[in-house]
Amino acid sequence: MGGTAVKKIQQFWKFGRPEFNTQWFDTNAVGQLIVKEGNYQYNIFDLVKKYGSPLEIVFPHILEQKVENLFDAFHEAMRRYGYRGRFYYHYPMKVNQNKEFIIPLLSEGANLEVTSYNELWLLKKLWGQNHFNARIRVLCNGPKIPKYLDLIVELRNMGVAIIPIVDDIGELEYLRRFRGDIGVRVNLGVKVHSHWDKKFDQFGTTPEEILKVGRIKNLKILHYHLGSQIEHGDDLVRAAKKLMEFYLKLRQLNPTLDTLDLGGGFAVPYTKIKSYSVQGIAQRIVKTVGAMAKKAEVHPPHLIVEWGRYAAAPAQISIFKIIHEKPVGNGSKKCWYVIDGSFMNDLLDTWAIHQKWHVVPVNNMNARKLMPVWLTGSSCDVDDKYTASGTYIRLPRLEDLEEGESQYIAIFDSGAYQDALASHHCLLSSPAKIIAQDGDITIARRRETPEEIGKLFGW
Ligand SMILES: Cc1ncc(COP(=O)(O)O)c(C=O)c1O
């Protein structure tokens, strides 16, 4: 394939474009998917032939680059506006708890946010293995059952910089004896453009209730999480402004307060270009909060973001083999391509929130003719399908494959949330998982055997 043909493929599948999170992806001269890590590169077709499908591939270097970009963006914005607060990134563990995600994030300087006793228990284990040092801070969100509160106290006594974020005012009673810093989560109810913008939101405490408490011992952090996959950058800035307004009020009662935690929400450009960038949003947040602090004559608060999907989604791709083709029927020109895995089990957001994915062929990207298709999973459920919101995906025709060749597809940005939500409908095995790092491959999860799956169901 010549240079022009390669360029056409790059353009068609939108490779090398940061606005689509595809700067690491490319094609080789024979139309196979390549992932680049500095001077290393991984041929995805070779990997799937070696390790089989379905297969998830994790790229720690992508995680690391996303976090680096985030730090650069906020540090640059703080320099530009002479902002004298500090910036902290807290990775929300719920987004992907796999160790192969957590370790590279810690190495890049990420702090952590946990939501449950079990997540915190894993951090205790990590602490015991000397995987992180006392400079890393841990925020504890979510409703706190007694053993969760007890573990927070235990870890603090062991030297972990751990900060409980009060979700319900009732937790303050227990925390009266807590010697460390604490935070409080406010429910501001800012309306945003997102699937998660709900009329009623059960998290945090209303501003009135927080103010009613008056002075809160060792209060350091005011936290608000406005939702996930926020479609408009303006919403992120507006929420920061509202939070800062409340910060200024709360600080009059609590002069120890010195940090704003803006929560998660930065969107992933799953398919379409978003109108905002990490640099642009960092500048707008820093400028807005900085100006408000100046006007109120207070020190600018330290800033925390918990953007999880932003970092984790692009660091994993999911590979499936097309095992059958059949007509959609009803006069449609489209075909079903049946995959050897399941959307419902392994990319659950396809079903839960009608997630749009960037789908590309792993091989035959240079095919002359493409076919409009819908994808369907291997479970028995009529909802186990991906139709790109009722449009279609264009993929190579199976009739053009060489004798004995199979067609594979890659689904990009599958690193956020999908693993913890995964299930076993029809007792299909979860995909095997490999890690591609520094030019080497390690196996993170072998394909489950029938015996292993049976055990989960008491067999
Ligand atoms: C408190 C909190 N912080 C951060 C996040 C991460 O959000 P996102 O992945 O959209 O950045 C969530 C997600 O639900 C959350 O509940």
Image (spheres, grey):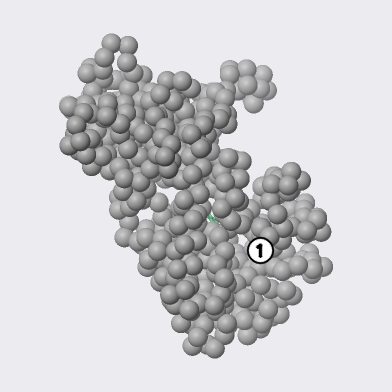
Return the x and y of residue 448 as percentages of the image width and height: 57, 23
* Residue at x-position 54% and y-position 48%: 95
Does residue 340 sit above or below 207 in this rendering? above
Q: Quick one: which residue is furthest to the front in this view? A: 39
The residue depicted at 64 percent of the width and 76 percent of the height is 257
Residue to which mark 1 is pinned:
165
Work out which quarter of the rendered image holds the C terminus and state it.
top right
Residue 171 placement, left or right of 210: right
Q: Looking at the figure, which quarter contains the N terminus?
A: top left
Q: Is residue 263 visible in this depiction of the protein?
A: no
Front in this rendered view, residue 187 or 416: 416
The image shows residue 57 at horizontal and vertical percentages of 47, 34
Residue 254, image quadrant:
bottom right
Q: For the residue labelled by badge 1, is the local secondary structure a helix, a strand or a loop? A: strand
Q: Position of residue 319 (x, y in %)?
A: 41, 30
Residue pictured at 34% horizontal, 51% vertical: 18
Which of 229/378 is in front? 229
Q: Amino acid at mark 1?
A: Ile
Out of 222 and 286, give the one closest to the viewer. 286
Nearest to the observer: residue 346 or residue 432 = 432
Residue 135 found in image quarter: bottom right
Vertical position of residue 13 compared to residue 219: above or below: above
Residue 325 x/y as whole percent: 29, 20
Position above or below: 203 against 412: below
